[in-house]
Image: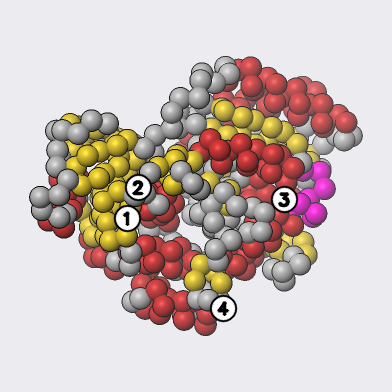
Amino acid sequence: MESGKMSIRLNYGREHVECALPSSVSWERLAKKSRGKPAPFSELLESAIDDLRAQLGRYGAARGCRMLLVIPDHTRRCRLDLILPRLTSMLERDFDARITLLVANGSHRLVADESLTTLVGEAVRLRYPISQHDCLDRDSLLFFGETSCGTPVWLNRRLRESDWVITICPIVLHYFAGFGGGPKMIFPGLAGYDTIAGNHRRAIDFLTGRLDERAREGNIEDNPVYRDLAEVEQWIPNWISWQMVLDEWDDIRDLAVGPPIEVHRKLAAKAFSFLRIPIGKPGDVVLASAGGYPSDVNLIQAHKSIHHAFQAVRENGWLIVLAECSEGIGSETFLSYFDCGSSEAIVERLRRDYRLNGQTALALRLKTEKARIVLVSRLAPALVRKTGMIPAADFEEAWSQVSAGLSAGKRARGYVFPNAAHFLPLASSS
């Protein structure tokens, strides 16, 4: 991107905002270069349907079987409105399946009925029973076993009340589990609160008092969080996983159907290559959009974009993040950790009393100790300040904070990151 006075349009919630980029900064756009036109969606869809049909037949799915379709919640883009009509039609016609749908909310909040219609499409919403997993509803949970790390695994009882489980999900980067999708659709997607907390706390190395270096985006080999949750496969015998790698326009770049861990590992390597963006020297200032709804629906989700954009900014540099956060924080336990003050104090509390999203609070606090982060959002300014970030109502207000902090007379290096939720900037040597 050439230097000079220019304007860029960035996503913010369900809308767009125009940001006038000051000419005092040499700006570079962080975006994935085109990898060619993707295959037509209809072709990929039919191929996956054929593959799924063949696997169900090979593994002995009987006619009239109870089929549970597990789908992501509203915080993930997945093309469900296009996939589900064709998929359910095949399952009914070829297997006379009794189909129910279950939303894998994990620890996320339940959504209103109209949001479910938007999620799956009106035809599917009217034809099939659909319910939402609630991690706090103990009556909906059954004990499945204990992982080798000692995590007690309580999962939604519908998993045992079904003959077959089909999970449908995109593979996305996850800042401490390595990748989303795959086995995460069941654990934590359909897990109880204490089970999710038991797994997520493995992102923290309590010996060093820091986040475990192995619990990072793109790593599933020795990641303690991923290795723990991946053990869920042993308790769900008739489980077929439909997984996709999507680009920023929700076009499918890769797709596979089969055993959840096998498919996840196969696509993860391809996904990491596709989802990372090489960069050179870190910037003095980074302007990042989370990519709009649903990636910026709340602060917990927006932190994933903050985490990605943070990789592109130098120490003590400036990061402006556009994330609407229309649903607020997204966690009842997150903000209380910032009462501790420093990251060291948060670690001490986590050692004594870990609560869900505690690792996210620690991760954000560590970032605000190394860079100055200005958040443009709908959150109350006092809440933003509590996290150590600087609140701003719009880009102009944010830039007024940044410009005052940049070195006078020195041309700053800047990056514009239009889709921080989707991609990860990494130094060329990474």
Q: Amino acid at mark 1?
A: Arg
Q: Using a 10 Å C-alpha cutoff, classify the residue at mark 1 as few (fewer than 14 neighbours), some (14 to 19) or many (20 or more).
A: some
Q: Is residue 212 visible?
A: yes
Residue marked by disc 4: 207
Residue marked by disc 2: 281
Q: Amino acid at mark 3?
A: Arg
Disc 2 secondary structure class: loop
Q: Using a 10 Å C-alpha cutoff, classify the residue at mark 2 as few (fewer than 14 neighbours), some (14 to 19) or many (20 or more).
A: few
Residue 235 falls within the magenta-colored stretch: yes
In this rendering, is residue 365 above or below 408?
A: below
Mark 1–mark 3 distance (CA, rounded to whole Å):
48 Å
Numbered tag placed on residue 314 in the rendering: 1
* Location of residue 106 in the rendering, given as x and y in whole percent from the top left corner: 57, 54
The N terminus - image quarter: top left
Numbered tag placed on residue 23 in the rendering: none
| Pointers 3 and 2 in contact (C-beta within 8 Å) | no
Residue shown at 87%/35% (left/top)? 59
Mark 3–mark 2 distance (CA, rounded to whole Å):
50 Å
Mark 4–mark 3 distance (CA, rounded to whole Å):
38 Å
Q: Amino acid at mark 4?
A: Leu
Q: In the depicted view, which residue is nearer to us: 307 or 214?
A: 214
Which dot, 4 or 3, sits closer to the camera?
4
Q: Quadrant of residue 103?
A: top right
Residue marked by disc 3: 158
